[in-house]
């Protein structure tokens, strides 16, 4: 099925063709993009779906006594590599007309990095793709061409390079302790009960890219500032690669349960206050990451299946939401809720695709989110974590309010702000054909998995006896969705909702953007003052020393006098005598 040796990683094929795309005109870039993702998909399928619990290793080689395995295919890696490949293919089609040269090229390299990270069999290979993903994605942010995107990209790069340094330091410590560099399960505690620093550093590296609380601000800071095409590309890879890494290395870590629940709840408030709908989607993405982290922390077979399956379909419907908002941005120049409304009249297909994504993210029965999100809540219930189950249901209701209702309603169905009688201009046009094709494909997959969950279940890591379409689960989910819709309608009619603000919403990054920046500038000023003072003292001392040396060794100094030959010979004889006696007595 593939013309390439199986020892070659699909990532190498995609990334090499992505680099080639940088030097081609638009038609060539588009063709290369399709070839790259098609070849990557065929190469991945050539490995086949491994049996449950089995794995296949390819591309084993050594460098400086490091044993590396570039391709490790098991059920978990296969699921993530497959969805990364599908996402890359959708990105190529979506950006067919509007992706810049750099977005088209680095988008392929970025997708290849995620695929390579998912298939990595050792930590060094993971580190290579980890850094490649960071470096390629920052160029996508910068391609927006705005001052805000430039600064956001710098902040993004600093944090993600730091994540790579943490990962590399952890890998070095593992190697120094004589440990195995296989990319597998890690424990925060060694056999003696002491903290495993290497595992802690690796966990911290994964935490940054998974947007854990307090290090999450890079996500809403960068995704909404990217271009219409760039935001779609960014939404698919980095955070899901981090979720995969957590599932591979830290499944069953209880600490992740509490962190995941916090991630699923606290971004809801920020999403509620945002006026920019792409920022609403970014915060909602953080909420869904909370579900995934929580599932990894629970760590049971059903929970890991839920994490893998939900990551798979979340990439599809979240990309679809960003695609629809990207089309809106392209046609109207804004994604602010206060400036949109009534677009269903001129962009009906985009509105329909957005509704499919909204139904999927709201976990409406017969849509993909209903299948996978219930695995996670079911795993919490099965593990008797009732508090987790309850809080995740609350988070689910919040997601319905924000991504499921607010985004499509205010973009397409609220007050008609584009009526010709109001603007004196024609209504915005429907999205370009390539964008609609990509949206249609993502919507079709979201519906297909919702109707035929067995297609996804057939490739999940574990075999579990779970059935989403139980009467109790269907009725419970419908009650939750209808309750959220009713609450939204009542609050909207009363004028209480939305709580939209045109001013920026303050997040924890305020700590280093405002007082942190002031503290940094103060420390620089104090350091500069101290340095000038110290340098002044040193300069004066050096000048005094030079003056004294000049006084004694200069042309007119005492050491410049003419010494008599006899006095010089006597001095030399005395020194020689001292040396001879020293050597004699030292024997």
Image (cartoon, rainbow, N blue to C red):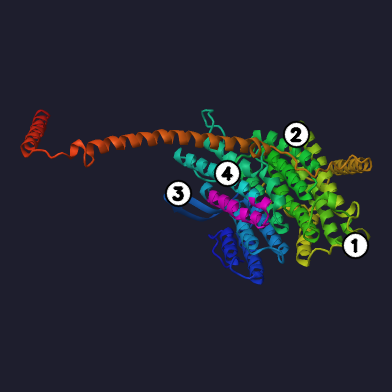
Q: Which residue is mark 1?
A: 424
Of tags 3 and 4, the one toward the viewer is 4
Question: Can residue 525 be found in the magenta stretch?
Answer: no
Q: Earlier in the sequence, mark 2 or mark 1?
A: 2
Residue 490, horizontal then vertical, whole percent = 93, 41
Contact, mark 3 vs mark 4 (Cβ under 8 Å): no
- Residue 291 in the figure: left or right of residue 362: left
Q: Earlier in the sequence, mark 3 or mark 4?
A: 3
Q: Residue furthest left?
A: 566
What residue is at 54 percent from the left and 37 percent from the top? 524
Mark 3 vs 2, N-terminal side? 3
For disc 3, the marked residue is 66
Q: Which mark is residue 388?
A: 2
Quarter in which the N terminus is drawn: bottom right
Mark 4 and mark 2: Cα distance apart in space: 29 Å
Q: Earlier in the sequence, mark 4 or mark 1?
A: 4
Q: Which residues are magenta?
A: 125-150
Q: Position of residue 421 (x, y in %)?
A: 94, 60
Does 152 sit left or right of 132 as displayed? Answer: right
Taking the magenta stretch, the answer to whether it contains residue 129 is: yes
Q: Residue furthest front?
A: 556
Contact (CB < 8 A) between labels 3 and 2?
A: no
Q: Residue 83: name its quadrant.
A: bottom right
Q: Is residue 476 left or right of residue 65?
A: right
Q: What's the CA distance linking mark 3 and mark 2?
A: 42 Å
Say which of marks 2 and 1 sits in front.
Answer: 1
Q: In this rendering, does residue 53 appear at all?
A: no
How far separated are the C-alphas under marks 3 and 4?
Answer: 22 Å
Say which of 87 and 193 sits in front: 87
Q: CA distance from mark 1 to mark 3?
A: 68 Å
- Secondary structure state at the residue bearing disc 3: strand
């Amino acid at each position: 099925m593939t013309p390439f040796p199986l020892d070659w990683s699909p990532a190498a094929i995609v990334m090499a063709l992505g680099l080639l795309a940088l030097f081609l005109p638009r038609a060539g870039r588009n063709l290369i993009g399709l070839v790259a993702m098609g070849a990557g998909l065929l190469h991945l399928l050539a490995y086949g779906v491994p049996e449950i619990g089995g794995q296949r290793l390819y591309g084993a080689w050594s460098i400086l006594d490091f044993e590396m395995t570039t391709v490790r295919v098991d059920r978990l890696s296969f699921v993530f590599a497959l969805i990364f490949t599908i996402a890359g293919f959708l990105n190529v089609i979506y950006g067919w007309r509007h992706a810049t040269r750099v977005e088209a090229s680095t988008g392929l390299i970025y997708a290849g990095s995620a695929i390579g990270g998912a298939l990595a069999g050792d930590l060094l290979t993971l580190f290579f793709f980890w850094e490649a993903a960071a470096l390629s994605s920052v160029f996508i942010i910068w391609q927006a061409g705005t001052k805000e995107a430039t600064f956001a990209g710098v902040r993004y790069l600093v944090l993600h390079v730091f994540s790579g340094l943490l990962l590399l330091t952890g890998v070095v410590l593992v190697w120094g302790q004589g440990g195995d560099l296989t990319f597998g399960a890690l424990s925060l505690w060694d056999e003696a009960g002491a903290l495993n620093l290497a595992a802690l550093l690796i966990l911290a590296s994964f935490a940054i890219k998974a947007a854990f609380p307090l290090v999450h601000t890079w996500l809403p800071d960068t995704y909404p500032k990217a271009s219409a095409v760039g935001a779609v590309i960014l939404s698919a890879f980095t955070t899901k690669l981090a979720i995969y890494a957590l599932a591979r290395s830290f499944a069953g870590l209880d600490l992740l349960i509490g962190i995941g629940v916090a991630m699923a709840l606290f971004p809801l408030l920020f999403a509620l206050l945002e006026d920019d709908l792409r920022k609403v989607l970014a915060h909602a993405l953080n909420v869904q990451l909370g579900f995934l982290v929580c599932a990894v922390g629970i760590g049971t077979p059903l929970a890991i299946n839920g994490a893998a399956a939900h990551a798979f379909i979340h990439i599809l419907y979240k990309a679809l939401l960003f695609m629809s908002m990207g089309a809106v941005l392209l046609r109207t120049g804004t994604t602010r809720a206060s400036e949109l409304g009534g677009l269903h009249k001129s962009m009906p297909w985009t509105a329909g695709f957005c509704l499919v994504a909204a139904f999927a993210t709201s976990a409406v029965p017969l849509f993909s989110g209903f299948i996978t999100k219930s695995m996670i809540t079911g795993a919490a219930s099965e593990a008797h974590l009732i508090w987790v189950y309850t809080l995740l249901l609350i988070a689910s209701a919040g997601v319905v309010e924000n991504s499921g209702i607010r985004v499509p309603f205010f973009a397409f169905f609220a007050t008609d702000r584009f009526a010709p009688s109001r603007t004196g201009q024609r209504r915005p046009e429907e999205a370009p054909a390539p964008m609609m094709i990509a949206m249609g494909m993502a919507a079709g997959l979201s519906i297909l998995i919702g109707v035929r969950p067995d297609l996804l279940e057939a490739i999940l890591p574990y075999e579990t006896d779970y059935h989403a379409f139980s009467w109790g689960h269907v009725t419970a989910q419908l009650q939750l969705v209808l309750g959220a819709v009713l609450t939204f309608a009542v609050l909207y009619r009363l004028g209480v909702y939305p709580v939209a603000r045109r001013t920026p919403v303050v997040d924890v990054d305020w700590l280093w953007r405002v007082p942190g920046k002031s503290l940094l500038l103060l420390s620089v000023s104090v350091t500069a003052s101290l340095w000038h003072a110290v340098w002044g003292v040193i300069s004066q001392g050096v000048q005094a020393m030079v003056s004294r040396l000049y006084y004694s060794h200069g042309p007119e100094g005492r050491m410049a006098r003419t010494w008599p030959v006899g006095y010089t010979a006597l001095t030399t004889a005395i020194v020689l005598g001292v040396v001879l006696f020293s050597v004699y007595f030292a024997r």
